[in-house]
């Protein structure tokens, strides 16, 4: 039987990958990697880049290119047999990574290369890879005794299993809940697009009526527009008790015990390596130097924004009381009455924008924006093997016509697909047998799909999401670094990786860029000036409330890992309650279990790093302010951002790159201005 995961293909053969291919392929590649490592280290004499790092990078790439489509399918086309094969490989990959990180011969060879006469002659990219490798050896326990090394390996393996189980629980809990509506009066207030989607979802399940789910295109509009308060409360409760001991599926996929064990293992790992806590350990790979620096940054933003948020919340409560007779807003009322107040204040609803953002035109407009900024041309390529009929593939060329990379675009929500939006690596740029390996990305969203013969129409928030993920994709694709360890997003500190993504969002607010794509899907008319003005006026609506919500999540995450909290689920809840008392303005109900679905920190890469979104938002707003000064499509400024940020990958420290682009260190003024919050004196981020 041929195994598509072992074939030397340019792109994955998704239609041919079967669960039974996965474990044999990974086992074979890991065995080959171990054999190669032994042969490399057994060679006598001084190691060089070409004899040590080059062959290992080649084999690393083979492993990554086999595992990448498997991991991706686990996220976008999950099923039981695929999940079993995926989980069978996780401990093998974790063990292998630990073996490499604790291989003393490899460490000595790397250190010898760093101290050799060759090292100063290497370019900055290879020097950075070597210095990162020495750091990562320390963070993998190279200095530990054998008993402690074995413990480290055991902890890492268990942590990998727990984090995967957390995410699978959340996926299962999300898809387990549905609500079939047969009484049309419950649909009052909902936009036609949402009602059509619910009817289509019911038909696909052989049911009569309107079927609602906890997928975002179904959940969010109910919370925002449904007039029936009990309907909103029911879906709010189901969503915010997912994978917990509360709610309609209480205890069935409870992530509570997993969270406690995850936090315990992280703390044990940090202590094993000599760190006071996991936050301190985490910062070894980030821009921020100390936990105190992160806390000061978050508290500074909170000090600037909480008073604004409190005023916004008080005004919303007064509005609900005076206009609707509602004495006390509950959590399931906030989006609904926020939308009602927005409509009253600005004579504007997000739904009015949807007809002007047909998905295909937004995608074309996104490509036009990056063409004007960076000189890129992006064209679709047919005949590419994909995992679902909705998926498209595109090639990216620069202004000289040179191919820079490609990406898969998977826009719409569907069953067995993880929620949210993300970019991930399919193929990484690197030198391969003398030629450059073209980078390829996965860009994944969960937008409302086309229904009833109409094109998919996006909200402005979804347009922002698409631009955000494409910013990540450009960071991966446009790198000119030829060594995988620091190409694209690799080697970029986690609290800087959101800069290119949040940066690109700014063009979603500018008339000049919106004119490239915001046209009515039926008439082709551009976005009316009056509607654009209302959108701009409403841009900072409830910006304070949005800011403190993100600070609530960031502070909860960082304090959880910095204060060694999470001894049990009650302690996790207690800390979240403390943070909410300090910064939140929306009162969460007693059964709210948001933390049970906070996959960013319990299953993703954002543990002790959720602050990165705000940290990078400061960088992106400040970087964009240079375009505000020079013109949002100023070609020289665009090319400079391309050359100093996007093309450099992780080859240099991000603060050095930012200063090179902006001419100084970042300040928070631009972020506060964009948020409609008075900044006062300039403050450094």
Image (cartoon, rainbow, N blue to C red):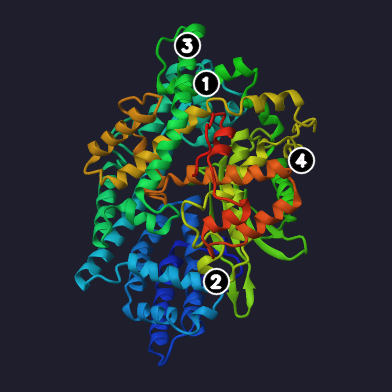
Mark 2 and mark 3: Cα distance apart in space: 59 Å
Mark 4 and mark 3: Cα distance apart in space: 40 Å
- Label 4: which residue? 516
Residue at coordinates 69% horizontally, 46% vertically from top-left? 366
- Label 2: which residue? 124
Query: Which mark is first along the chain, 4 or 1?
Result: 1
- Label 1: which residue? 338
Query: Which mark is first along the chain, 3 or 2?
Result: 2
Query: Which mark is first along the chain, 2 or 4?
Result: 2
Query: Which mark is first along the chain, 2 or 1?
Result: 2
499 on left or right of 370: left
**Would you say residue 317 is visible in this rendering?**
yes
| Residue 657 x/y as whole percent | 57, 57
211 on left or right of 293: right
- Label 3: which residue? 318
Element on which disc 3 rests: helix
Mark 1 and mark 2: Cα distance apart in space: 51 Å
Q: Nearer the viewer, mark 1 or mark 2?
A: 2
- Whether label 2 touches label 3, CB < 8 Å: no
- Whether label 4 touches label 3, CB < 8 Å: no
Rate crowding at label 3 as few (under 14), some (14 to 19) or many (20 or more) other CA atoms within 10 Å.
some
Mark 1 and mark 4: Cα distance apart in space: 30 Å
**Would you say residue 385 is visible in this rendering?**
no
Rate crowding at label 4 as few (under 14), some (14 to 19) or many (20 or more) other CA atoms within 10 Å.
some
Please state which of residues 168 and 181 is positioned toward the viewer in this rendering.
Answer: 168
């Amino acid at each position: 039987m041929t195994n598509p995961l072992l074939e030397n293909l340019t792109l994955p053969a998704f239609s041919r990958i079967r669960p039974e291919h996965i474990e044999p392929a990974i086992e074979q590649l890991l065995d080959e990697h171990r054999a190669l490592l032994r042969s490399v280290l057994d060679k006598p004499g001084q190691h060089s880049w070409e004899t040590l790092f080059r062959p290992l990078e080649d084999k690393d790439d083979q492993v990554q290119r086999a595992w990448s489509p498997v991991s991706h399918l686990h996220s976008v086309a999950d099923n039981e047999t695929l999940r079993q094969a995926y989980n069978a490989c996780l401990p093998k990959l974790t063990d292998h990574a630990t073996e490499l990180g604790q291989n003393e011969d490899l460490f000595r060879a790397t250190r010898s290369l760093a101290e050799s006469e060759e090292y100063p002659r290497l370019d900055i990219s290879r020097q950075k890879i070597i210095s990162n490798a020495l750091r990562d050896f320390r963070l993998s326990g190279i200095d530990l005794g054998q008993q402690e090394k074995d413990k480290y390996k055991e902890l890492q393996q268990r942590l990998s299993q727990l984090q995967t189980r957390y995410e699978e629980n959340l996926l299962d809990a999300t898809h387990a809940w549905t609500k079939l509506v047969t009484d049309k009066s419950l649909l009052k207030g909902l936009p036609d697009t949402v009602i059509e989607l619910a009817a289509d979802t019911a038909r696909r399940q052989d049911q009569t009526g309107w079927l609602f789910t906890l997928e975002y295109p179904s959940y969010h509009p109910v919370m925002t527009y449904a007039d029936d308060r009990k309907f909103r409360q029911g879906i709010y409760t189901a969503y915010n008790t997912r994978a917990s001991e509360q709610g309609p599926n209480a205890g069935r996929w409870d992530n509570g015990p997993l969270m406690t064990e995850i936090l315990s293992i992280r703390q044990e790992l940090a202590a094993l390596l000599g760190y006071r806590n996991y936050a301190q350990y985490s910062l070894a790979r980030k821009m921020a130097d100390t936990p105190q620096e992160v806390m000061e940054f978050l508290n500074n933003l909170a000090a600037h924004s909480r008073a604004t948020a409190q005023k916004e919340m008080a005004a919303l409560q007064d509005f609900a009381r005076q206009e609707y007779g509602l004495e006390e807003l509950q959590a399931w009322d906030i989006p609904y009455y926020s939308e009602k107040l927005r409509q009253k204040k600005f004579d504007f609803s997000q739904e009015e924008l949807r007809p002007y953002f047909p998905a295909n035109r937004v995608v074309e407009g996104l490509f036009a924006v990056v063409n004007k900024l960076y000189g890129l041309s992006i064209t679709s390529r047919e005949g590419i093997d994909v995992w679902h009929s909705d998926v498209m593939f595109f090639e990216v060329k620069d202004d000289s016509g040179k191919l820079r990379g490609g990406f898969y675009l998977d826009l719409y929500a569907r069953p067995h697909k993880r929620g949210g939006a993300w970019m991930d690596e399919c193929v990484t740029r690197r030198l391969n047998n003398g030629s450059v390996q073209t980078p390829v990305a996965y860009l994944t969203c969960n937008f409302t799909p086309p229904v009833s013969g109409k094109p998919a129409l996006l909200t402005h928030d979804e347009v922002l999401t698409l631009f955000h993920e494409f910013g990540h994709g450009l960071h991966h694709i446009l790198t000119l670094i030829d060594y995988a360890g620091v190409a694209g997003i690799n080697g970029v500190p986690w609290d800087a990786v959101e800069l290119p993504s949040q940066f690109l969002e700014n063009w979603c607010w500018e008339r000049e860029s919106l004119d490239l794509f915001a046209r009515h899907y039926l008439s082709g008319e551009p976005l009316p000036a009056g509607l654009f003005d209302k959108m701009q006026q409403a841009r900072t609506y409830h910006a304070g409330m949005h800011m403190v919500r993100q600070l609530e999540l960031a502070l909860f995450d960082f304090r959880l890992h910095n204060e060694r909290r999470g001894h049990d689920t009650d302690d996790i809840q207690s800390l979240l309650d403390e943070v909410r008392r300090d910064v939140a303005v929306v009162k969460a109900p007693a059964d709210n279990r948001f933390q049970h679905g906070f996959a960013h920190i319990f299953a993703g890469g954002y543990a002790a790093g959720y602050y990165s979104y705000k940290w990078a938002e400061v960088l992106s707003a400040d970087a964009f302010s240079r375009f505000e000064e020079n013109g949002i499509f100023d070609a020289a400024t665009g090319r400079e951002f391309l050359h100093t940020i996007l093309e450099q990958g992780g080859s240099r420290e991000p603060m050095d790159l930012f200063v090179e682009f902006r001419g100084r260190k970042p300040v928070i003024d631009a972020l506060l201005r964009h948020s409609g919050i008075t900044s006062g004196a300039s403050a450094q981020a």
